[in-house]
Amino acid sequence: MGKRKIILDVDTGTDDAMAIIVAALSGEFDILGITAVQGNLPLKNTLENTLRVVQFLGLDIPVYSGCPSPMVQTLSPGRMQNQIIQVFEKKIDGVKLNIHDEYLDLPESRIMPQKQHAVSFILECLDNAEEKITLISVGPPTNLGMALRMKPEITEKIEEIIIMGGGVNLANRTSAAEMNFYMDPEASQILLQADVRKYIFPLDATCSILFSKKEAGEIAALGNAYAEFFSSLMTHFIDRITALGISNNSSMNCHDIAIHDVFCILYLIDPDIVLEMKRENCDVDFSGGIADGQLIVDRRSYVKPRGKNNVAYKLDKAKVMDLLMRILKV
């Protein structure tokens, strides 16, 4: 049996870069393409950062530029005025700090993106596929939502979709919504309603295990360039959220990080990293109110699951760390 064929859809900042590195170094996947979308940063930044990571890895993986804005969200004036937005940027000693730097600390890319648009690539790749392809969505799902809206029957060629997005009991971008789903609620709803098996990693799962500089040091001690860069991403992320006063749990004195997007890759390698997963009915609010972008899970006992959405809630840190160490050891 050959390697699992995947398309990785990213908005490359810190944890997306980690996910690309793990996917590429694992040896488990045939990466057909990486598609960039706006999200953590504008498209010009997420595209360049994706190219920098692929160049750093020294691999011939095609990169495609995708959608620079959400499907319809920004067409309604005032739609996003009612939410209290996460503090993700502020000036400290006159220096502007953001959760994600505009560009990763890697050499400027010399490789070029493909000329074909990301959505066209996704459609063409699936149309021509002789075996089913797994899609991995770790940014706002605009590219995938557009592809599914244009041609819903592509689900016949999709093995499954692995999604980092939403929060059942947790939120970050607003009081109700996680970043990826908030940045394109309509595309998120299209994705969740698609007639294909999906595994969703909301904040509940990705924040169930956190990582400190201790784990970053253990990874750096592997002693190769990939592990050292991965470790530097972790350390920099810890320093940045500490400076911004962001906590990933109930203690405001804890600035350990969640490496959100990486778990979508690790799950495909070893599903046992998930300790709790439930098949549930899922929707995304796109009404434009204070709950815009919220993942809604129907938890009523008498309502049976109708769709193909599986929601992760808890991860095994020891297994995750062991898997990361084995992959990054290279």
Image (tube, rainbow, N blue to C red):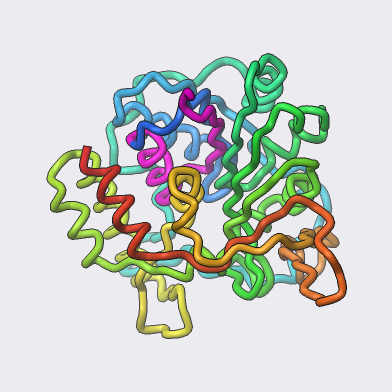
Is residue 215 depicted above or below 117 in this figure? Answer: below
Is residue 243 depicted above or below 192 in this figure? Answer: below
Q: In this orientation, which residue lies closer to the viewer: 104 or 27?
A: 27
Residue 73 visible, this orientation: no
Quadrant of the drawing holding the C terminus = top left
Tell me which residue sits at (53%, 40%) in the image: 10
Tell me which residue sits at (68%, 14%) in the image: 128
Is residue 58 depicted above or below 316 in this figure? Answer: above
Tell me which residue sits at (81%, 77%) in the image: 301
Report the span colored magenta.
1-25
**Outermost residue to the front:** 1
Residue 233 x/y as whole percent: 31, 52
Is 197 positioned to the left or the right of 10 in the image?
right
Q: In this orientation, which residue lies closer to the viewer: 1 or 250?
A: 1
Could you say which quadrant of the image residue 81 lies in? Answer: bottom right
Is 228 positioned to the left or the right of 289 in the image?
left
Residue 206 x/y as whole percent: 49, 63
Residue 182 x/y as whole percent: 68, 58
Residue 294 visible, this orientation: yes
Could you say which quadrant of the image residue 115 lies in? Answer: top right
Could you say which quadrant of the image residue 223 lies in? Answer: top left
Q: In this orientation, which residue lies closer to the viewer: 65 or 219?
A: 219
